[in-house]
Amino acid sequence: MFSAALAVSRRVRHSWVPILVLIGLLCQTAVGLAWTAQDRATATEPPSQAPAPALARPLPDTDGDGLLRQPPAFELADIKHYFSIGKDACTVGCATSFGTVLGAADGVPAQSNCTPTCIHPEYSYLDLDTGAISVQARDPQQPNLRYVGLIYQCVEYARRWWMKNLGIAFGDVPGAVDIIYLTTAEDIRTHQSIALARSINGAAQRPPRRGDLVVYYPDRQDPEWRWGHVAVVIGVDQERGSVSLAEQNYSNAPWEDPTDHARRIRLFEVGGRYTLIDVSPTQVKNADGGRIAGWVYPRSAR
């Protein structure tokens, strides 16, 4: 899908670390780990350490650290390939029929994309005069119609919710994960630039709040998580440790509460730092879940 996240069970590439022999001890210099003679006799292979993930350059208005580097752009040939096979994934194996209304939050309905990999080449537009949403096969070239996104994708829903409820829109992004790296949005009527801020999952001192966009990392080895994912925070219950989300193209199943939210995930506070985990408050695991990068919001809401 054009929205997804780095799967919890990531594949990690290991590399051998040089070992020095010194005064009868083996010292793994990369991690400062000493081995005794008994260790050497019983060990079957030397210890290894995964390379540290590359971190993003510091961004302004960032709460917390540890944001991973922005993924490189796909090659044009790859994008064309994914688009081609995505068009064939909109009618087969659907969780719900393409276009089925799954629920609505704050007057913004979410519709089924059939499967996470479906890409249907039509686009939604917001009429700034009436507030109505229309679907077009190409740019209608009308000044009162503001582009929203590729229909029934997660990015389209997040942008539409912001446009309808906050009156702002974030810019074009290659995939959902790229939203976490944006530094500005725009007022859809005045075109005034709006500064964006972000909180990094696991290091944030500001908890998620209503209207924030929760952004997931991608897993490019998994077609369903190739682009990352984004969802809108609809409610936060810090006492019970849960966050309610509204979204499109996560599971494409009917919402948990069709009049309020799609699903809920866990929120933890440890030492004044906040962490979101892509697991339901009633469950202990989510085999199909993803890794959350953080949450994005207008700087004025910081």
Image: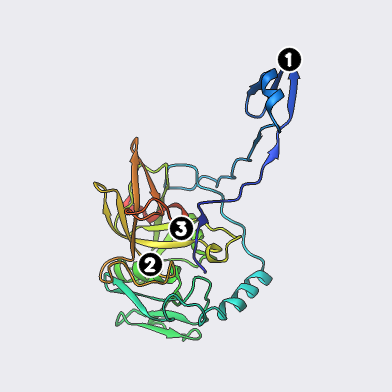
Circles 1, 2 touching at the beta carbon (< 8 Å): no
Q: Nearer the viewer, mark 1 or mark 2?
A: 1
Residue drawn at (75%, 20%), measured in percent from left and top?
21
Work out whether mark 1 precedes mark 2 in sequence or the reverse, and give the earlier one: 1
Callout 3 crowding tier (Cα within 10 Å): few <14, some 14–19, many ≥20: many
Q: Is residue 142 left or right of residue 129?
A: right
Callout 2 crowding tier (Cα within 10 Å): few <14, some 14–19, many ≥20: many
Residue type beneath disc 3: Gly
**Count of all numbered marks drawn on residues in the image:** 3
Compute the Cα span from label 1 to label 2.
59 Å
Residue drawn at (34%, 69%), measured in percent from left and top?
161
- Residue 16: tell me if it is visible: yes
Compute the Cα span from label 3 to label 1.
47 Å
Residue type beneath disc 2: Glu
Picture layout, residue 175 above or below residue 24: below
For disc 2, the marked residue is 247
Picture layout, residue 283 above or below residue 129: above
Element type at marker 2? loop
Q: Position of residue 99 (x, y in %)?
A: 41, 81
Compare residues 286 and 302 and report the one nearer the observer.
286
For disc 1, the marked residue is 24
Q: Residue lying furthest top in this view?
A: 23
Element type at marker 3? loop
For disc 3, the marked residue is 289
